[in-house]
Image: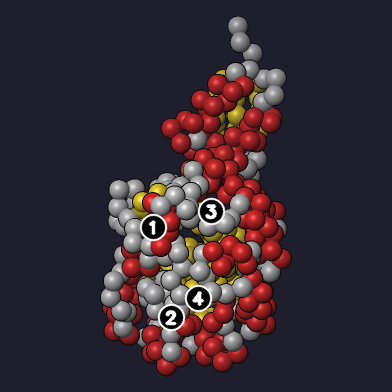
């Protein structure tokens, strides 16, 4: 069964604060208010492109803080999804929101309208980092909201960011550990990008904010991804989805942007696995699952080149269907 989201963006809807990193209109590519009629139009357009057979489809309200919208407006938007759920074309609704806009009344209404998954923008579990980012909520509010969402039977998604003002690698690791304790069903990891027309852009240009480098963000997100995977938590995204706006030369002013950021992170994990197993071996065939070959080889054969330059190892990566993800088999090759 292949999963699809139909993204319905409600930029800045319900947001009581302007987080230093945020310009939802640029991030989502949307500048106008989303109406109930828009919901129907967007769903119809997407359903024309998604195969009926073998598909699990959800309507997804992203951007802004959905549960900060007046509850009547929330209902009006969700009611446009109802006919598609009744016909079986759409299985449910997922949405993103803030942890301080979760309470019993809100959750009762979401459950009544067929919401299945609630994602909370946590960003950090350090109150100091949250204040520096003008988030307007605390780590304790994240804990309370997550527990309440679990109690109501929703699937819980938690989103974190790295490289925020005042953040450090160790604080990000602390955030990941705290998030894992809340037992989310899924997690997203977003390295902070400096977006045009944000407070963070002004901070960056004045020298008050120094963004992560691509290399440091990859190394940190590798640690975070492994933390979540070791707890059996599904990480559904690492890095912002590239769009016309979210791209180098467009609205991204600075920060660790890469169109295949997750691929870099997973390739770095494969590098570590291979380097550890190749100690003392100068020529080898490296076997991985065929679907993982590109990650093992690395972007522009980066892992192959690095293994040679740092370890003097010449390797050829091949596929073996019997190997699981991240399983590596090394066969030393004799040279004549």
- Using the image, determine if residue 220 lies above or below residue 196: above
Q: Give the residue at x 30% y 48%.
A: 249
Q: Give the residue at x 41% y 52%.
A: 206
Q: Is mark 4 in CB contact (under 8 Å) with mark 3?
A: no
Question: Is residue 269 rendered to the left or right of residue 60?
Answer: right
Q: Earlier in the sequence, mark 4 or mark 1?
A: 4
Closer to the camera in the image, 289 or 237: 237
Q: Secondary structure at mark 4?
A: strand
Q: Residues within 10 Å of mark 4 (few under 14, many from 20)?
A: many
Q: In the image as oriented, which residue stretches furthest toward the top?
A: 336
Q: Which disc, if any, is residue 97?
A: 4
Q: Which residue is mark 1?
A: 202
Residue 131 pos. (x, y %): 56, 68
Q: Earlier in the sequence, mark 3 or mark 1?
A: 3
Specify the quadrant of the image occupied by residue 162: bottom right
Q: Is mark 2 in CB contact (under 8 Å) with mark 4?
A: yes
Q: Can residue 40 be seen here?
A: no
Q: Give the residue at x 53% y 53%.
A: 163
Mark 2 vs mark 1, CA separation in Å: 24 Å
2 vs 4, front mark: 2
Specify the quadrant of the image occupied by residue 179: bottom right
4 vs 3, front mark: 3
Mark 4 vs mark 3, CA separation in Å: 21 Å
Mark 3 vs mark 2, CA separation in Å: 25 Å
Q: Is mark 3 in CB contact (under 8 Å) with mark 2?
A: no
Q: Is mark 2 in CB contact (under 8 Å) with mark 1?
A: no
Q: Which residue is mark 2?
A: 14
Q: Earlier in the sequence, mark 3 or mark 2?
A: 2
Residue 141 pos. (x, y %): 63, 77
Residue 336 pos. (x, y %): 60, 6
């Amino acid at each position: 069964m292949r999963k699809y989201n139909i993204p319905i963006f409600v930029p800045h809807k319900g947001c009581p604060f302007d987080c230093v990193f945020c310009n939802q209109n640029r991030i989502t590519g949307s500048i106008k208010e989303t109406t109930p009629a828009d919901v129907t139009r967007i769903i119809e357009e997407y359903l024309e492109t998604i195969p009926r057979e073998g598909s699990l489809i959800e309507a997804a309200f992203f951007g802004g803080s959905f549960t900060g919208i007046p509850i009547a407006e929330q209902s009006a938007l969700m009611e446009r999804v109802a006919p598609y759920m009744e016909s079986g074309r759409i299985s449910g609704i997922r949405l993103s929101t803030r942890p301080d806009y979760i309470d019993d009344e809100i959750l009762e209404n979401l459950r009544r309208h067929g919401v299945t998954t609630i994602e909370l923008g946590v960003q950090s579990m350090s109150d100091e980092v949250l204040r520096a980012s003008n988030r307007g909520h605390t780590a304790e509010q994240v804990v309370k909201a997550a527990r309440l969402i679990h109690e109501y039977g929703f699937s819980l998604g938690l989103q974190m960011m790295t490289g925020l003002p005042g953040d450090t690698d160790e604080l990000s690791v602390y955030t990941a550990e705290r998030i894992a304790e809340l037992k989310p069903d899924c997690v997203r990891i977003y390295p902070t990008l400096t977006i045009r027309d944000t407070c963070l852009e002004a901070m960056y240009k004045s020298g008050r904010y120094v963004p992560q480098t691509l290399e440091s963000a990859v190394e940190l997100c590798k640690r975070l991804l492994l933390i979540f995977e070791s707890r059996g938590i599904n990480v559904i995204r690492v890095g912002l989805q590239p769009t016309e706006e979210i791209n180098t030369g467009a609205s991204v002013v600075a920060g660790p942007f890469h169109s295949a950021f997750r691929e870099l992170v997973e390739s770095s994990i494969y590098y570590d696995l291979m380097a550890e197993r190749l100690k003392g071996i100068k020529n080898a065939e490296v076997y991985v699952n065929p679907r993982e070959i590109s990650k093992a080889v690395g972007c522009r054969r980066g892992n192959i080149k690095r293994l040679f330059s740092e370890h003097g190892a010449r390797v050829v990566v091949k596929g073996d269907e019997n190997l699981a993800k991240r399983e590596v088999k090394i066969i030393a090759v004799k040279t004549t």
